[in-house]
Image (cartoon, rainbow, N blue to C red):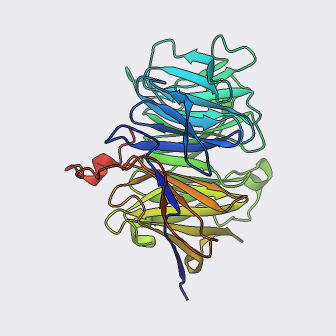
Amino acid sequence: MESITTVRPFATSSLSLPINSYIYCIKAAGGTLAAISSDDSLRVFDPVTLQVQADRVFENAHTGLVCLEKVDVEAGSVFTAGRDGYVRCWDLRSGKRTVELKDEKSTPFLSLAVAPGGTAVAAGTELTHSQATVQMWDLRSPQSPVVRYVECHNDDVTELCYHPSRASSLLSGSTDGLVNILDTTIADEDDSLIEVFNHEASIHHAGFLTDTDVYALSHDEQLSIYHLTSPDERESSNNEPYPIVFGDMRARVDCEYVVDIATSSGSVSIAAGSHSTSTLDLIPLHHTVGWELDMSRTVRLLKAHDDEIVRTIYIDGQSSTIYTGGEDGVVKVWRPDEAANSSAHIGPTRTKRKRDSVADGNRRRPY
């Protein structure tokens, strides 16, 4: 029997953003939280009080800031990338920019990934002059990219993700519908390609669920899970139950859009939103023989950014706290385990803006 746990927001903050700003992404780094937004700023704030650290607001971090990635949760540094063709590293403790990398043709970056341990960073570009590239820098000698792949995709590179335990393996996803697994120790592009999954729809998000399982989510909400096959598995006649095709998640779980797959402390959930009802559902995804939705343990976040789209979700597994950011320019905090779900506002108030009179499909275009 389906059971839904409903949760109201515990606290909210606008992070002192200009009116009509979107919050694109929230990441944890060095005991703080960092957020990027449509005003091209990088803002660092306290995870408990939501107070922005005044000396840790990086205005104009990029011209067209689109990507934010942490080095790791404990490190006090984050990387950003933008449509200006730059990748930058920011030390959140000192408030200084420590690394700056540049595409030689100033091609806009749309995706970013940092290798486990922070030894390398990869960035993917927009399709420009019939070419979209994936390039990687060794941060121990970052003067120029050590790898530059120009043929693995023929459209915008919208997603990059390093393997959780093998820093040499890189996942790339594109609006061409392909998800590639690349061995970045191999410079030759053909030889570097380990595996290709054809999702047959423009990739919005993709990543590793386990060391061997990969998910792909399209811009039209099609979700599938694929399996990385070893040489032994390729030769075996034992057919694994892959790919697992969930199809259009809007019909599958009665939502209007999917934010992404949210992971925390080994748990995996689908973050599915409905702006018409101002809700965001976290639906557990369990791994047994294959992967299955557990609708009976759905957590529903009420008043989830009113009728605006939720852009980002971060779950702190240690404190059982959920942070969301959306197109209303607000960060909201949720604590499903709290016995009393009282609501508090922290930071400046904001007058609700008039909803954009454009199609939802266009509003989902990332930047």
Residue 95 at least partly seen: yes
Task: Left or right? Give the position of 158 relative to 18.
Answer: right
Q: Residue at x 45, y 58 (%)?
A: 258
Q: Residue at x 37, y 65 (%)?
A: 278
Q: Residue at x 73, y 45 (%)?
A: 164
Instruction: Tell me if residue 282 comes above or below residue 262 in the rendering.
Output: below
Image spot of residue 321 (x, y percent) = 62, 60
View extreme (left): residue:
357
Quarter of the rendering occupied by the N terminus:
bottom right
Image spot of residue 293 (x, y percent) = 58, 72
In the image, 87 versus 178, the foreground residue is 87
In the image, 134 versus 44, the foreground residue is 44
Residue 200 at least partly seen: no
Task: Left or right? Give the position of 239 relative to 284.
Answer: right
Asked which quadrant contains residue 99, the reply is top right
Instruction: Tell me if residue 333 comes above or below residue 192 in the rendering.
Output: below
Image spot of residue 237 (x, y percent) = 73, 63
Asked which quadrant contains residue 38, the reply is top left
Image spot of residue 269 (x, y percent) = 59, 63
